[in-house]
Image (tube, rainbow, N blue to C red):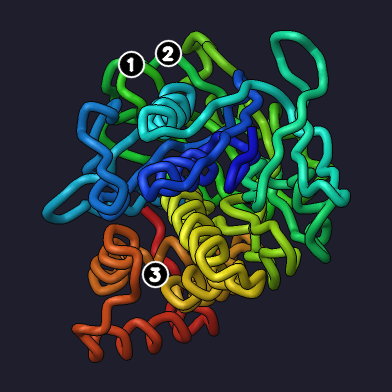
Amino acid sequence: MKYDVVVVGGGPAGATAAEDLARSGVSVALIDRAGRIKPCGGAIPPRLMQDFDIGEEQLLTKVTTARMISPTGRKVDIPIENGYVGMVDRKDFDPFLRDRAVKAGADYYEGTFVRIDRDADGTRVVFREKASGEEKPLRTKLIIGADGAKSKVGRAEVKDADKVPLVFAYHEIIAAPPKTDIYDPERCDVVYDGAISPDFYGWVFPHGSTTSVGMGTEDPDVSLKEATAALRRASGLEDCETLRKEGAPIPLRPMDRWDNGKDLVLAGDAAGVVAPSSGEGIYYAMMGGRVAATAAAACLASGRAKDLQLARKLFMGEHKMVFRVLRSMQDAYYKSDERRERFVSLCHDIDVQRLTFEAYMNKKLVKARPMAHIKIGIKNLAHLTGIVRPEHT
């Protein structure tokens, strides 16, 4: 059977691309290596639920507060005004997205990507079928590579795909304790502490009956498991039952090119679309899958390979400024505990809180209050230069 598009990878990016293409009448196959669960805090904003028709039944819980914790233990609670952040477990959320793609008309194959073959008869994606262990070819016109960070598809087909900087993330899913003075099942804790991560952060994210506790770092010498154990002790969670342990690399920068100029385009982590500073990935992965599907459909309709470039153009046109601001924030504040202390102090400001969550919830920089932006710029400079000394509580 020959497909219009073969999608490699069934996470949020690949499943979304497959579903969108199937709903538009394109013949599409989805190849996924089932059983792999990406370490992920699991936060999804209302914008995602709206854009991708995700019902509340998929949520494990609703978070109404974010707590920022500094190296000295300073705590800043940021309420989520007029809404909430939904929490999902990728163990259940990813299969839900794949099942939805199949219901829309995508053919699903369980296996591992091996290679892409091209000859006079066309293009074939070869995968190793899980059930039989045999190599199977799928003939196709186009390919979407959505097989995550360190994408095998990307490294084989797209220039510089192997040069994307990575954070190594690790988390443990634990049985959630009852509410205490330290743990709140409706609050996400973000820990900015060099003892946990020298260049990123640690997290404690509630998932209803379970909790995700983890951290990330670019430093290969840091023990992810030891840092997570330290985070669990600091959070009063060391005695909770450990249910799962998961680790994976996470890209830090969108690639400069997402297509191979012929018949392939990347999506999601494979294209590097994880938000700097926050590490948020689910929304951007699903949007990456959507624009990849749009570009593939345009290429099929026109026959022009250059239309595959549309995926990156659409994504960066919408999100480039947010990524640029978040990258600047990470570069400015994640370098030392002194800088992290100042960052948490800055988060205490009401203007910063409101604009940060408006940007997170709606996925765009809010321009409605220009004076607030000016005030934040001044405060940011004051904190970075040391004019304002961080308070400790």
Which residue lies at the image location 61% right of the left edge and 68% below the top edge?
Answer: 303
Q: Are marks 2 and 1 in contact (CB under 8 Å)?
A: yes
Outermost residue toward the right in this view = 119
Q: Answer with the quarter of the image where residue 7 lies.
A: top right
Q: Which mark is residue 175?
A: 2
How far is disc 2 from disc 3 in space, using C-alphas? Answer: 33 Å
Foreground mark, 1 or 3, reads: 1
Q: Which residue is mark 3?
A: 346
Q: Which residue is mark 1?
A: 209
From the top left corner, tell me how far across and down residue 108 is, in percent: 54, 26
Relative placement, left or right, of 174 versus 77 is right
Which residue lies at the image location 67% right of the left edge and 64% below the top edge?
Answer: 258
- Which of 283/369 is in front? 283
On the question of residue 277 being in view, the answer is no
User: What's under tag 3, amino acid-wise?
Assistant: Leu
**Above or below: residue 124 compared with residue 275:** above
How far is disc 2 from disc 1 in space, using C-alphas? Answer: 6 Å
